Image (spheres, rainbow, N blue to C red):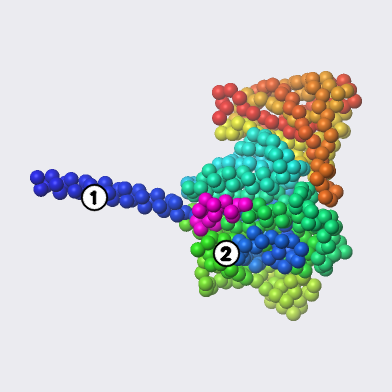
Amino acid sequence: MIFQQIKSNVIWVCIGLFFVSCLKEEMQEQLQPNIVIILVDDQGWGDLSMNGNPLVETPRIDGIGKNGATLQHFYVNAVCSPTRAALLTGRYAVRGGVYSTSAGGERLDLDEYTFAQAFQEAGYATGAFGKWHNGMQYPYHPNARGFDEFFGYCSGHWGSYVDAILEHNGELVESKGYLTDVLTHKAIEFIEANKDGPFLTYLPLNTPHSPMQVVEPWWEKFEDAELPRHRYSDREKILHSRAAYAMAENIDGNVGRVIDKLKELGIEENTIVMYFSDNGPNGWRWNGGMEGIKGSVNEGGVRSPFVIQWPGTIKAGRQVEEITSVQDLFPTVLDLAGINYTPKNELDGESIAPLLLEDSTVWEDRILVNHWRNRTSIRSQGFRLDESGRLFDMQRDAGQTSNVADSFPSVYEELQKVKETWESEVLSELPVEDHRSFPLGHPEYPITQLPARDGVAHGSIRRSNRWPNCSFYTNWTNLSDSITWEVEVLSAGKFEIDLLYTCQSENVGTEITLTAKNASLAAKVTTAFDPPLRGMEYDKFERGESYVKDWATLSMGEIDLEAGLQTLNLQATDIPGKGAIDFRLMMVRRVGEDSP
């Protein structure tokens, strides 16, 4: 009897220990911090009130720094897609094959490992909402790079910020409202759905990138506003800057919506929120006297605002003066989340968690490299060596006005050597020619989009604008004209083809033929659809990009595609009128038994 009682007690103790262990694991999982990363597009360091801009008011963004930390000298790349690649991988963008902002050069190599994949593997729900800009076709697509959910666009810019056509996990969707508001709303929905955590929410907003579209009430304040004077006021485009500032205040309102939702859900103290921009300002406006704008590797082109909060963990009001970079964010967020990971590639960034969490940290001086289109600039804690070999004392001369190479010869020689070594050892990893084809028909993903952006026009066909990202093809007038894509069909099968097109009534009856390696498919346009261009009604400054319009769908039918490299050719085989169609996008959908 005593033995049986002891045995029973032991069993109950074991059961109790088991449940305690399970509860402990569950509590540990619940204690993993949520992550919210807000990345904005083309906003300069000086576009925020916290950095001294006397006109724009951004209290909610400023509040992140007041509640947490501000990185005073945080550096990104000169343009959009390289910064996003460096964020995702913790590596210089050229290592990952990113050398352009469109037509395939924005794609992140498939052997690169992203921080989102690390979070996904650690059990986080992961979502991205906004501008991707590192590849569209799966497995370049965000759904293949660590994000369970994607809502937004994969292109470098979008042509309409009001009632935009976007995508949700590959499927085209129509949105309603101003784009930054829509994207923020979707991110908040994701946060609500995963409030029990842990979650990673990546919110890469689309503004203040052009087109400079602003809606009320954000425009009212700036419509006639007097702009702050600065060293480049003679180059400033007044309406452009007013629109950028209006966009900045709209962004601030949306940041406030995210913070308020975290508070409402009771998870603010267990959520890390960070905010920064992908490059310098997209125009000559007030920027603290710094030299350079977007596209420049000088200080003003690559220095970004950066604020981060983690209430109760990162001390409120911390100011970090050490130079830091976008490459640092990969190891930093994983360290802060307590996630063990093994980098699949050598990281160029280093975790700055000690700078955020510790009151006294021994931090060795480091050197950062900025590169864009054959221009390389080197930044140490105290100096910058610019692309032309001039040296500037950044502690005394943040505007880069006086070359001090002769006064600091050892510094000049050191930074010049760093530049030469980086270009020979790192930049050399970028191939001279890009031989990557566009993948099509991945067996794990049913949809491939082939936009006009990624196609090559032949004959009389012309882009609607010189910037490919959100363009369409027009002026299709001859039977010899065509549009081609160099693709690799990753898995053979049957595919359904839809074209997004417009066609004037006089051109109804045009026959379009798609040819592939050993297959072809033809369809006739039977319905006219010729809407006007739109977008200008919301533009506050004349855009450089293409205007947009609505599109009809031409269902061409099904085609059998073999696996392997091949050229897809879209050609008009009958043009009864003066022209064929305007073309925006080809949707390729796997059908049948092989469809995932």
Q: Secondary structure at mark 2?
A: loop
The residue furthest left is: 1
> In the rendered view of the protein, which quadrant contains the N terminus?
top left
Viewer-nearest residue: 114 or 378: 114
User: What secondary structure is marked by label 1?
Assistant: helix
Cα–Cα span, label 2 and label 1: 44 Å
For the point 67% across and 30% down, the residue is 588
At 10% from the left edge and 48% from the top edge, which residue is drawn?
2
Residues packed near mark 2 inside 10 Å, few (<14), some (14 to 19) or many (20 plus): many
Residue type highlighted by circle 2: Gly
Which secondary structure dominates the residues rendered in magenta? helix
Q: Residue at x 65, y 45 (%)?
A: 183
In the image, taking residue 22 as reference, residue 71 lies left or right, namely: right
**Residue 265: within the magenta?**
yes
Mark 1 — residue?
A: 13
Magenta includes 359? no
Contact between labelled residues 1 and 2, with CB atoms less than 8 Å apart: no
Q: Earlier in the sequence, mark 2 or mark 1?
A: 1
Q: Which residues are magenta?
A: 257-272
Q: Which residue is mark 2?
A: 68
Q: Position of residue 116 (x, y in %)?
A: 56, 49
Quadrant location of the C terminus in the rendered image: top right
Residue 558 shows in this picture: yes
Q: Residue furthest bottom?
A: 407
- Which residue is depicted at the point 81% across and 42% down? 535
Compared to residue 345, the image places residue 592 above or below, namely: above
